[in-house]
Amino acid sequence: MSEDQHKKRDPEQYVDLGHFDLENHLKTQVALYEKRLKEGTAANKVAAFFATNLLGFAYHYLKSRFGPKAAYQYYPSNGDDGIYRLHTYTEAVTIALVSDWATDTPESDLIGNLIRDYDPDYTIHLGDVYFVGTPEEVATNFTNPDASWHFGKHGSLALSGNHEMYSNGSAYFKKLLPAMKIRKGDQIATQQAGFFCLENEHWRIIGLDTGYNSTNRPLLEVLFKPDCNLRDEQLKWLTDIVKLNDPNDKRGIILLSHHPYFSSFRDDHPVVGRQLKKVFGAAERPVLWFWGHEHRLSFYNQFGFPDGIKAWGRCVGHGGMPVETDAPDRGHLGQLLFYDQRIRERIRRRNVGYNGFALLTIQGPAITVQYIDQKKQTVITERWTVDPTGQLTTEILEIHPEVTKY
Ligand SMILES: [Fe+2]
């Protein structure tokens, strides 16, 4: 895009000008997204992201992976405690969750624009900016005028995955977080750390940072897999500021993280659940936990490792990468409820599934979660309800007829 195009704006953009900086910013983004969609300016092809593209990955990895890790950021920071009350202009709060989305491909543009169609109050990225979370990759996916990230009406937040840390996390902390704005009362806050809590009188939605400790020293991490443990600063925040250990707080708990607590397809991360059990203490109860990292959509019944919290798992790592459709071959098969094994197309002789995202609609003690695919089809709709003791109940309302019930 030339300098001139950056300076020019269509007068239509100024019609219905909002009162908040955030709203004005969003209107600008919407106009630019529409232009970008028409022009098809995505930089990457999704085929470049296959796990078999080792050469491509090794190139980016080796180029970015050396040097010290970015300094850890935590609350309180600039007067912010990382807790944000949920806002909406309607009777229900809507939140779009999308993970492993930032690939700057026609697929990620499609999902970014689909999220915009639903116009949610909040949008949250559950991590992984590809290939390795460089400043340029943050810009092309999130912050350039023609980037296809959709900012929620009341804000956006971003978790770190492992890929942000492959470039040592500096672009995540110094470029992506400063772009993530969220309403805090009548102020607009900037995300200060890789974890956060969104809440109202019925629910607490807690974003956890499993990314920072998902990498080790270069190459060594290939041999000794890091366990993604939550750093002490984060555990202290969960205890002292969020007060997850308060037995009188009976709100429903929803966790978000990049890495799965458990999986039937790839690695478990039991340490995180064990750390959380210690934080909860007597206030512990089973939680709903959304994660990504695996490029698929899957659903698990309640499970917990010994000495770890119990959680219903939902993997929503199908945001922007080629979606894997392979059958499960690890543990927890007894807990696996569904996975979206539908094949969308074959790319490079590999089966590729449907990209998508999750849309949460929060109405009092009930949350409806709709899993929407790139063709705007509903894959599954489920409803969660929290009772006055903080216990969750769940009910599946709708399943796409071609989705495998495991
Ligand atoms: Fe990941």
Image (cartoon, helix red, strand yellow):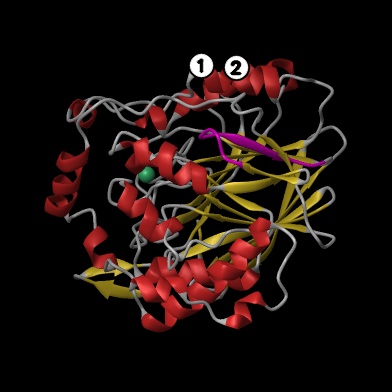
Q: Which residues are magenta?
A: 190-200
Depth check, front residue: 8 or 355: 8
Residue at 45% x, 32% y: name it. 210
Q: Is residue 116 left or right of residue 386?
A: left
Q: Is the residue 396 above or below the residue 217 in the image?
A: below
Callout 1 secondary element: helix
Q: Is mark 2 within 8 Å of ligand 1?
A: no
Question: Label 2 near label 1: C-beta < 8 Å?
Answer: yes
Task: Say if 116 sits above or below 230 in the image.
Answer: below
* Residue 340: mark in rendering: none
| Label 2 neighbour load within 10 Å: few <14, some 14-19, many 20+ | some
Ligand 1 occupies quarter = top left
Left or right: residue 207 versus residue 321 is right
Q: Is residue 354 shown to the viewer in this render?
A: no
Residue highlighted by disc 1:
232
Query: Left or right: where does residue 91 sit relative to residue 233?
Result: right
Per the image, label 2 sits on a secondary structure element best described as helix
Ligand 1 within 8 angstroms of badge 1 C-beta = no
